[in-house]
Image (cartoon, helix red, strand yellow):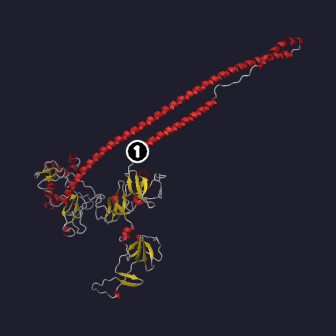
Amino acid sequence: MAEAILGDQDQYSCSICLDLLRDPVTIPCGHSYCMSCIGECWNTNDLNGTYRCPQCRQTFKSKPPLNRSTVLAEIMEKLRSTESAQSLAGPGEIACDFCSGEMIKAVKSCLECRASYCQTHVQPHYNVPALKKHKLVKAAVIPVCPKHDKVLEVYCRTDQKCVCMHCLLDDHKGHDTVSSTIERNEKQIKLTDTQTKVKQTIQAKEKELQKMNMDIASHSDSAKKAVENSKKVFSELVKFIEKKSNEVIEKIKAEEKADLDQGAKLQKKLQEEITELKKREGVLEDLLQTDNNIQFLQNCESVSSSSASDELPSSSFQPYCSFEDIRKLICELAGRLETTCTQEISKTITNVSDLSAKRPHFTFDIVVGDHVRVKPSVVTPTHKWGSVTHLSIGVVKKIQGDLLTVDFPEQRNWTGVVSEMERVTSAGSDLPSKNDPFNIKVGDKVRVKPSVITPKHNWGRNVTHKSVGVVKDIKSDDSVVVDFPGHANWKGIITEMEKVTNDDEIGPSSLGSNIKIGDKVRVKPSVVTPTHKWGAVTHKSIGVVKKIQGESLTVDFPEQKNWTGIVSEMEIVASTGLDIQNGSLILDVDFSGIMTIPDLADIKLETESE
């Protein structure tokens, strides 16, 4: 019932102890706190007799009376009475130190007892008078001093770190120190101001984003209208050409009809002449076939007198229009139109490109110091290749507008265009580095990065920066489950982790900068074959550095003098005071004091295979 009344319990929590209100009091500004919390806060922050609300920062000239809010206290008690169901502690969560069997999730941790309690076992701290004085905080791993194993409760402003009371008499003696509560309150005021500024910035950015969304939507609508208008214009242009094409076709057809009509008349006339001639031919044929001479002679003159009709003028079809010429004219017109359209449309496209070229180039991705290379899609850079290729990887030295200056191994101070470049991850390699979180997979050995002060899900039990565990599972939300020797199913964030190699686990592996002339060294166990080969040297061989030049070094081994190797492939061998060379025992002894050397015969040498 209380949960239904309260709804969101966080708004009924004390902003100082972050727990549900106990003995709640309401100060004049309207904010409520635990009576003990606000009293302690005002006692430690009494600035010139003024008192401030920890939330709204309202100032009171005199200390307001702290009267218990009975109604609010009853609601809080009812809510606590309904919180009997307790959940089990999951990965990364703190378990109650007093629950036996199942690991119940802790709700509070005591800085005095240095233990964590569930809702049931924390009750004595609220009821027992001696335990009421203890400082309870939200369940968490209690930070302790690694040197004195005491709770960190003091802040050293000189070294800017939390220390214990014993540190004040030791390493931090005479430093500027204050209680963690005072430092927390002062820093909380600054962080509150920063939070207010961040909120104001967020609001301003949200307004900018809203305006940008409107501008982008308006721009998109404008582009759609431009596309629609272009389609309409070109469609009208096509219709205009089709109309003129139809006019030309109709004209050709009209010319064709006129010529065909003329041809039809000539055909009819010629057909009539042929018919007339065939009739005359029939008369002549009949006359030539008659046997009566008198009749032949009488009709011969009349038939022969019409012979003039044999000399009729010949006629031929001669059209007024040559359609072959028309075809040539149409082809010439099409060529001129195609040339004109191509030129004009190209000009329009160029003008559109010129307009888009004026937009600013954003360089959010590339900054000075980044490793970059020319994009594979760029055939030839604007400012030419020089000695650079697609495989070249360089460091950005300078960015000015759209131009950037890059130092490549092949060419220094190379000039390029930002839009033609791309970043290269992992310091000049496409392969992920050892510390790249995306290179971590199930089964890998990992540890918390040294740069992480406190993991997001806290340290848990027995987990430190030195702890090395095995990745058990990787979730989609970038969380990772790790089995550490002292804490199984530990939950962390993958970006807070780094892989651990065999070399890292071995321990005192040497860095190149630590090796100097005169050091005793050997080849690292992780090196299968040295760059300059083994020669007579093995992993067990221990020699003395004779010379170092850049990344190369010269070592005198008992098996081989003047052996050449690479600094990064070597490790320093710590001196134990005893050494065996060629079967002889060598002791490194400091004779500055008096000491007794036992008989060498009584010394039992035990050699371990390296």
28 shown above or below 166: above
Examine the rendered structure and indicate whether residue 79 appears above or below residue 111: above
Question: On the rendered structure, is 33 left or right of 271?
Answer: left
Crowding around mark 1 (Cα neighbors within 10 Å: few <14, some 14 to 19, many 20+) is few
Q: Is residue 175 visible?
A: yes
Q: Quadrant of the C terminus?
A: bottom left
481 horizontally vs 10: left or right: right
Q: Secondary structure at mark 1?
A: loop
Q: Nearer the viewer, residue 210 or 14?
A: 210
Name the residue: 34% across, 85% down: 603
491 or 580: nearer the eye?
A: 580
Residue 25 position, x and y percent, is: 14, 51
Q: Amino acid at mark 1?
A: Lys
Q: Is residue 497 above or below residue 33?
A: below
- Left/right placement of residue 79 relative to residue 402 reads left
* Residue bearing mark 1: 358
Residue placed most toward the observer, 128 or 439: 439
